[in-house]
């Protein structure tokens, strides 16, 4: 089983142990709007952000940690700077959670809650699903069945047509058995280029799934959202996840991309771009996510900018952020952002 990413990071750290606890609701603790992308993504694929906290005017990075599980889940921000020593025996009694994975239906007993609540860590011992994957299925089944269900217990309905955008195969396969569902890809068949969608695809789908894809679309993010709305039937919906921050402005990291390519030199990758008006640009410090194809991290949404973009792109039937935990299915969020979002198109499904 994959270890908690945070614990792995701690084990790499040396130096004296020093622990500082800050309650997230403490008025002295603020999550500033101007987080640089490095502070969110410096730990490789770590989408669960390291937030900045400001006790007594100094800025430190911190991670959310579980401190209580009953009756409610309670998280505190744990300061990383100065670094923490590896967990010792006294800290070994960390909170644990038993849950039924809503993707494979497998039962998981006494899994460390800090692993279950890590957005990207593999925490189902059976299928390897992460919190993000289970959140997608929580949102999808809640919208279709009116309640959160595990895929093995959900009744099949082949009249429901859906499509995924580079969906995780762990849920793409069960979805293709339940529904008239097809996964699509940018670099292989069945292909879908969300910036160039054939008109025959418009109005065809009851649901679309796009999980951590839209932060990688190179240009015209508004057009990508608008095309997804066009692909939906009236009353259809999109299940969306992207990394986004709780407040602040939308950030496009490469706003003038036009003719661009990657240059590898000296073991580093640079992005070379010629803008529409002929200006040459070179970017370093590129942030890539794992996976095939084009995975350059292009932008950081904020909650408000994301909702605004969805509303102005044709999702006129309501937008819901899935904030409720679903611990029976291993969905417990330590943060109030980067959650699953459902964006619906107005109208009635037939
Ligand atoms: Zn599973």
Image (spheres, rainbow, N blue to C red):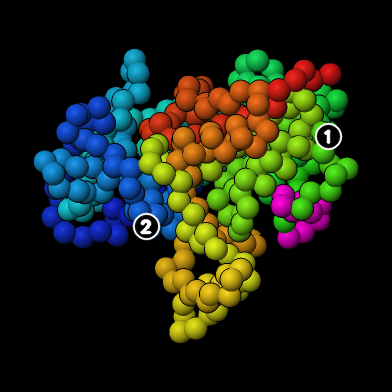
Q: Position of residue 57 (x, y in %)?
A: 13, 44
> Taking 219 as reference, is 340 above or below it?
above
The one nearer the camera, 199 or 181, is 199
Question: Closer to the camera, 63 or 327?
Answer: 63
Q: Secondary structure at mark 1?
A: loop
Disc 1 within 8 angstroms of ligand 1 (CB): no
Q: Going 53% across and 43% down the picture, which residue do you hit? A: 242
Q: Residue at x 58, y 55 (%)?
A: 216
Image position, residue 217 (x, y; %): 62, 54
Mark 2 crowdedness (10 Å alpha carbons): few <14, some 14-19, many ≥20: some
Which residue is the site of mark 1?
Answer: 204
Vertical order, 99 against 300 (above or below): above
Tell me the quarter of the image containing the C terminus. Answer: top right
* Region in magenta: 187-195
Q: Main secondary structure of the magenta part?
A: loop
Give the image quarter of residue 157: top right
Find out whether the residues at labels 2 and 1 contact each other: C-beta distance under 8 Å. no
| Left/right of residue 57 with respect to residue 291 in the rendered view | left
- Mark sitting earlier along the chain (2/1): 2
SS class, disc 2: helix
């Amino acid at each position: 089983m994959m270890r908690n990413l945070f614990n792995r990071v701690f084990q790499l750290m040396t130096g004296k142990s020093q622990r500082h606890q800050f309650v997230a609701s403490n008025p002295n603790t603020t999550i500033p709007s101007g987080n640089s992308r490095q502070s969110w993504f410096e730990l490789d694929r770590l989408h669960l952000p390291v937030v900045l906290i400001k006790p007594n005017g100094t800025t430190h990075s911190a991670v959310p940690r579980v401190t209580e599980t009953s009756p409610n889940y309670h998280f505190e921000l744990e300061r990383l700077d100065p670094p923490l020593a590896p967990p010792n025996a006294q800290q070994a009694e960390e909170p644990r959670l038993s849950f039924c994975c809503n993707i494979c239906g497998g039962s998981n007993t006494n899994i460390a809650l800090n692993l279950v609540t890590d957005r990207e860590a593999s925490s189902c011992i059976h299928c390897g699903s992460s919190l993000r994957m289970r959140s997608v299925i929580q949102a999808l089944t809640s919208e279709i069945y009116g309640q959160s269900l595990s895929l093995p217990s959900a009744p099949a309905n082949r009249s429901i047509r859906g499509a995924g955008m580079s969906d995780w195969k762990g849920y793409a396969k069960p979805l293709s058995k339940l529904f008239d569902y097809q996964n699509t890809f940018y670099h292989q068949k069945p292909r879908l280029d969300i910036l160039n969608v054939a008109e025959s695809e418009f109005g065809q789908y009851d649901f679309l799934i796009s999980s951590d894809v839209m932060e990688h679309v190179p240009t015209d993010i508004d057009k990508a959202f608008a095309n997804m709305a066009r692909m939906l039937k009236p009353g259809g919906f999109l299940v969306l996840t992207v990394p986004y921050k709780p407040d602040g402005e939308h950030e496009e990291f490469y706003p003038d991309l036009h003719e661009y390519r990657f240059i590898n030199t000296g073991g580093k990758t640079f992005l070379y771009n010629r803008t529409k008006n002929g200006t040459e640009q070179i970017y370093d410090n590129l942030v890539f996510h794992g996976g095939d194809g084009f995975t350059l991290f292009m932008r950081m949404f904020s909650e408000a900018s994301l909702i605004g973009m969805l509303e102005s792109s044709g999702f006129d039937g309501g937008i819901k952020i899935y904030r409720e935990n679903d611990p029976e299915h291993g969905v417990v969020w330590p943060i109030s952002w980067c959650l699953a979002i459902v964006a619906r198109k107005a109208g009635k499904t037939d």
